[in-house]
Amino acid sequence: MDSSGHQLKVASLAKALGLDPARLSKSMYTKLSIQIRTKKEVLTDGAKALGSIIKTELARVRVPDDVAAANAAVCRSNKCGAFIQLDKHKRVKEGGRISLKVVGQEPACDVCNCSSRGLESKWANPSQKCPKDLWDNTKL
Ligand code: SF4
């Protein structure tokens, strides 16, 4: 996607959320940018995340809980500058109009593009590591 196309999509999402696109802070622009990733990016990231979720949640192939918690703490400390809390939205219909409501927050990494359960499963996945080498489950 070219940069003007990307900016238009960010502006469109901002408007849908009731925000003024001309007054977005840098961090809000980044959050919205992540949420409008291209379908290819979302599918690639989704496939990786799904594999990680299956491995750690269904097959229970996981690092010890304290290691996963320590990885989560490293991300949440945002020492890397890439950790983001994304707003979780739900479409709601009110008075015949559909709008987006914020219903919570979910963690995301701006380097690997993992978010929500994908990032949570990555913390526990024995074959995963931080792309900035701040934690590494493969060395356990
Ligand atoms: S995985 Fe690494 S780069 Fe991504 S948010 Fe966590 S510490 Fe930061």
Image (tube, helix red, strand yellow):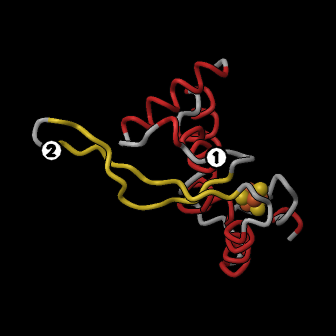
- Quick one: 117 or 101, which is closer to the camera? 101
- 75 sits to left or right of 132: left
- 134 sits to left or right of 53: right
Q: Which residue is mark 2?
A: 94
Does 40 sit above or below residue 124? above
Where is residue 3 drawn, in percent x and y? 66, 22
Q: Residue at x 68, y 53 (%)?
A: 109
Q: How many marks?
A: 2
Q: Which mark is residue 128?
A: none
- In terms of secondary structure, where does tag 2 sit? strand
Q: Is residue 118 visible?
A: yes
Which residue is outermost to the bottom?
66
Q: Residues within 10 Å of mark 1 (few under 14, many from 20)?
A: few
Which residue is outermost to the front?
23
Quadrant containing the C terminus in the rendered view:
bottom right
- In terms of secondary structure, where does tag 1 sit? helix
- Quick one: 134 or 65, which is closer to the camera? 134
Where is residue 129 drawn, in percent x and y? 80, 58
Does 73 sit above or below residue 88? below
Three-letter residue code for mark 1: Lys
- Quick one: 66 or 114, which is closer to the camera? 114
Q: Residue at x 52, y 23 (%)?
A: 8
Q: Residue at x 71, y 66 (%)?
A: 75
The CA distance from mark 2 to mark 1 is 30 Å
Q: Which mark is residue 26?
A: 1
Q: Residue at x 67, y 69 (%)?
A: 76
- Quick one: 123 or 92, which is closer to the camera? 92
Where is residue 16 drawn, in percent x and y? 36, 36
